[in-house]
Amino acid sequence: MPSSVWGRGVALCALFLAGCETVPPQQQLKNTSRTFNSVVVDAGHGGRDSGAYRRSGPPEKTVTLDVATRLSRKLRDSQLKVVMTRTNDVFIPLDTRVDIENATPNSIFVSIHFNDSRRRGVKGFETYYHSPYAADLAQNIQSRLCSLKGAVNRGVHTADFRVVRKALYPAVLVECGYLSNRSEGREARNGEYRELLAEKIAQAIVEQRYGVGAYHAPAPAVVSQESQPPPPPQQQQKRKPVLAPPGEGPGLAPPTLSGH
């Protein structure tokens, strides 16, 4: 092959690979970890994607939406702007969630999930991030959650989940316990416990922005029909979980963490 043709071929391949890049270059990342005035709250899964599901409790998509709704209310009460990626049981593609977070200026992104494992004994909180600018936020959220009585700290980790990998602003993904664990699955069915989860995450976010001691818990809101605890298991439609593979939207933790 002539050298000129070879050179053009190499150049075209380079352009193609550049177009396929899915991770924002380092210079494009925005460090709003201490200056943000908006929070994009993402309730994991939804619609046809149930997330983790066990017969003893509601599907993941139901409890993530409930925690996300409670969290959003607390953040608004703390004078932060909030954008929710979903407010009801609808399917939102991962790339659409990314578009929402990247289109919200001066923001951070917090994705709410619950975990699953084939080993019933596995339990605890985990928080994930990708951008170095999100490390402190992830650690603060993890620390607040682990202050709950009986909490198990499974650590803060970097991850390639799409919603944190493609984020321009600091983004974290929070695993609020294992639905596959009997005790944590039972707690997830309790509205008061989900309120505590939202409270701890809200406290971490507000203190991340304004400093330790800045968060003041609002008075309990009147429980609406939308925030009532999920119906008993026998009233729910029994369906198999739709779990995306690790790195493309969590349901199961990465094998090195979950023991799969």
Image (cartoon, grey):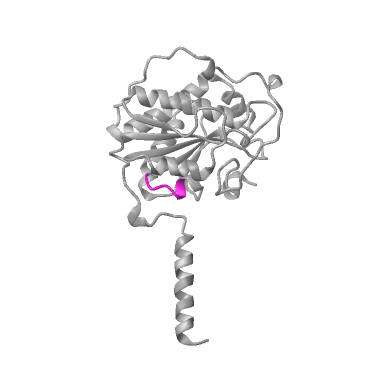
153 or 61, which is in the foreground?
61
Q: Position of residue 191 (x, y in %)?
A: 53, 19
Number of numbered discs overlaid on the protein picture: 0
Name the residue rendered at 52%, 28% in the picture: 65
Residue 214 lies, in percent from the top left, at 29, 27
The residue stretch that appears in magenta: 164-169
Asked whether 12 or 169 is in front, the reply is 12
The reply to whether residue 216 is visible in this rendering is: yes
- Residue 119 shown left or right of residue 107 in the figure: right
Quadrant location of residue 27?
bottom left
Q: Is residue 33 left or right of residue 90?
A: left
In the rendered view, does 225 fall on the left or right side of 237?
left
Instruction: Tell me residue 91's x, y (percent).
Output: 57, 36
Of residues 193 and 236, which is closer to you in this image?
236
Camera sees residue 150: no
Against 28, is 13 above or below? below
* Quarter location, residue 41: top left
Relative to 46, is 250 above or below?
A: below
Q: Residue at point 71% right, 28% down?
A: 238
**Which secondary structure type mostly characterizes the magenta part of the structure?**
loop
Q: Is-magenta flag for residue 231?
A: no
**Residue at screen point 31% across, 25% down:** 79
In the image, residue 58 sits, relative to residue 222, either above or below, namely: below
In the image: residue 26, left or right of residue 85: left
> As displayed, is residue 167 above or below residue 20?
above
In the image, farthest residue toward the top: 222
The residue under the point 54% across, 15% down is 225
| Furthest-bottom residue in this view | 2
Q: Is residue 166 magenta?
A: yes
The percent position of residue 10, horizontal first and vertical second, equals: 47, 76
